[in-house]
């Protein structure tokens, strides 16, 4: 299942690129967003990377996110997600931009617990995988045509453990090919 989703994420943008019938499908931007996450019972550090394509005023974004509690010597949780998002960009004046995205993706959550029996500890890993429904919003300040900086807010709704993350986003924009 995981490999099928990855193949779909790779084939979809390439198939749109090959359909160049005068429309302007192009690489729009790439971004990185370090931050923090919160779920039902824990919190920790998260990092997100994105690659975005544009077709007319539509954005198609591939997003990869991973996060973990900062506790390495005791019980801890970590997760990762691979998402395909559809979104729009709204200009708020000349320098401020608001992005809104929603989509579907693969979500994997792993909870590591140590159980003590006498003098021995037993490691119990419980990985769980599911389909996630990510929703995100960003507010960015555009320094120039190539770089913008802002805040990102994202929620990944899923049946295992819904995760909210927020952080600073740095986005590099690419010029549209003519």
Image (cartoon, rainbow, N blue to C red):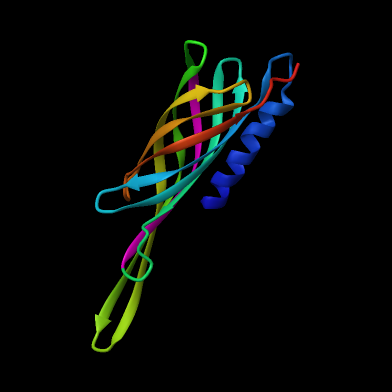
Q: Quadrant of the C terminus?
A: top right
Residue 3 seen in the current view: yes
Q: Residue furthest right?
A: 178
Residue 8's image quarter?
A: top right
Q: Is residue 68 magenta?
A: no
Where does the image place residue 19, in percent across and percent down from the top left? Answer: 72, 23
Residue 14's image quarter?
A: top right
Residue 54's image quarter?
A: top right
Residue plotted at (31% across, 49% down): 161
- Relative vertical location of residue 14 with respect to residue 26 in this rendering, above or below: below
Where does the image place residue 115, in percent across and percent down from the top left? Answer: 27, 76
Q: Residue furthest top?
A: 93
Residue segment shown in magenta = 75-89
Q: Nearer the viewer, residue 27 or 86?
A: 27
Residue plotted at (41% across, 36% down): 134
| Number of residue marks | 0
- Relative vertical location of residue 65 with respect to residue 111 in this rendering, above or below: above
């Amino acid at each position: 299942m995981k490999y099928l989703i990855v193949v779909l994420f790779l084939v979809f943008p390439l198939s749109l690129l090959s359909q160049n019938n005068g429309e302007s499908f192009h690489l729009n931007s790439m971004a990185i967003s370090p931050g923090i996450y919160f779920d039902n019972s824990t919190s920790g550090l998260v990092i997100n990377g994105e690659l975005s394509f544009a077709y007319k005023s539509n954005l198609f974004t591939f997003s990869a996110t991973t996060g973990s509690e900062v506790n390495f010597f005791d019980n801890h949780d970590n997760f990762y997600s691979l998402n395909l998002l559809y979104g729009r960009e709204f200009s708020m004046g000349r320098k401020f931009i608001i992005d809104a995205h929603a989509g579907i993706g693969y979500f994997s959550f792993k909870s590591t617990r140590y159980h003590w029996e006498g003098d021995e500890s037993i490691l119990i890993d419980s990985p769980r995988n599911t389909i996630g429904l990510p929703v995100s919003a960003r507010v960015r300040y555009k320094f120039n045509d190539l770089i913008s900086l802002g805040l990102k807010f994202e929620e990944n709704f899923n049946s295992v453990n819904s995760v909210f993350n927020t952080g600073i986003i740095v986005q590099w924009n690419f010029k549209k090919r003519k």
